[in-house]
Amino acid sequence: MNKKELEEALIFPQGEKNPYGAYFTGQSYLEGMIADKDLPFGVGNVTFEPGCRNHWHIHKDGYQVLLVTAGEGWYQEEGKAAQLLHAGDTIVTHAGVKHWHGATKDSWFSHVAITAGEAVWLEEFLMDNMKISVNKKLFPNIQQNRTIKRKSSSFIR
Ligand code: MN
C-alpha cells in the first residue's frame, strides 16, 4: 500500500512524527487518541512507513491490543514466527512478552494500539533468519513458517 492509498484508507488521523522514534527503525507517526487518567490504558494510532518497525520491547505490568486498520505489516513474538498482518487483523500481547511490530518492506502500515503498563524498549530487531507465518487461504503458494536468510542490513518483503 503506498502513501496515498494509506491516507485514503486511514480512519483515524496519522498524527505527528512519533516522539518515540528513538525506539523505531525508520519513520513512524503517532496520533494520541485517548489518554484518560481514569482509564488504565491509552489508545493511539501508529503509522509506519515501508520497512519501519519498532525495536524489541515488552509491555511491563500491562498489555497491548493492536487493531490493524491499513496496509501490510508484521508482528513477531520472540521464539515464534512473524505474522503477516492486514486490515482487520487483531493482536493481543500479554505482559512481559518480548515482541516487535511494523510495516513490511514495500507497504505502509497502520494500527490502533491500546496499551497498558510500561513499555520497556530493548534491542533493535534485525531481519536475519526471520520466520514468517502466513495465512494459507490468502497465500496458498507461500511455504508456511519458512525461514528467510538475509543480510541484517536488508529487509524482507
Ligand atoms: Mn508492542
Image (cartoon, rainbow, N blue to C red):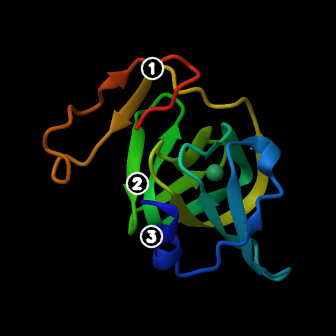
Where residue 27 appears, x then y in whole percent? 69, 50
Residue for badge 1: 129
Q: Is residue 89 above or below residue 132?
A: below
Of the 4 image quadrants, the one containing the C terminus is: top left
CA gap, disc 1 to disc 2?
19 Å
Q: Is residue 19 above or below residue 32?
A: above
CA gap, disc 1 to disc 3?
30 Å
Q: Earlier in the sequence, mark 1 or mark 2?
A: 2
Disc 1 vs disc 3: which is toward the camera?
A: 3
In which image quadrant can residue 54 be found? top right
Tell which of 126 and 156 is nearer to you: 156
Find out if the beta carbon at label 2 lies less than 8 Å from the nearest ligand 1 atom. no
Q: Secondary structure at mark 2?
A: strand
Residue for badge 3: 5
Give neighbour class at mark 2: few <14, some 14-19, many 20+ (Cα, 10 Å): many
| Type of the residue with mark 3 | Glu
Residue at 13 percent across and 44 percent down: it is 140
Residue at 40 percent across and 34 percent down: it is 81
Please indicate whether residue 10 sits to the left or right of residue 46 in the image.
Answer: left
| Type of the residue with mark 2 | Leu
Name the disc covering residue 154, or none: none
Give neighbour class at mark 3: few <14, some 14-19, many 20+ (Cα, 10 Å): few
Where residue 22 appears, x then y in whole percent? 81, 43
Residue for badge 2: 85
Give neighbour class at mark 1: few <14, some 14-19, many 20+ (Cα, 10 Å): few
Q: Earlier in the sequence, mark 2 or mark 3?
A: 3
| Type of the residue with mark 1 | Asn
Q: Secondary structure at mark 3?
A: helix
Where residue 20 appears, x then y in whole percent? 81, 52
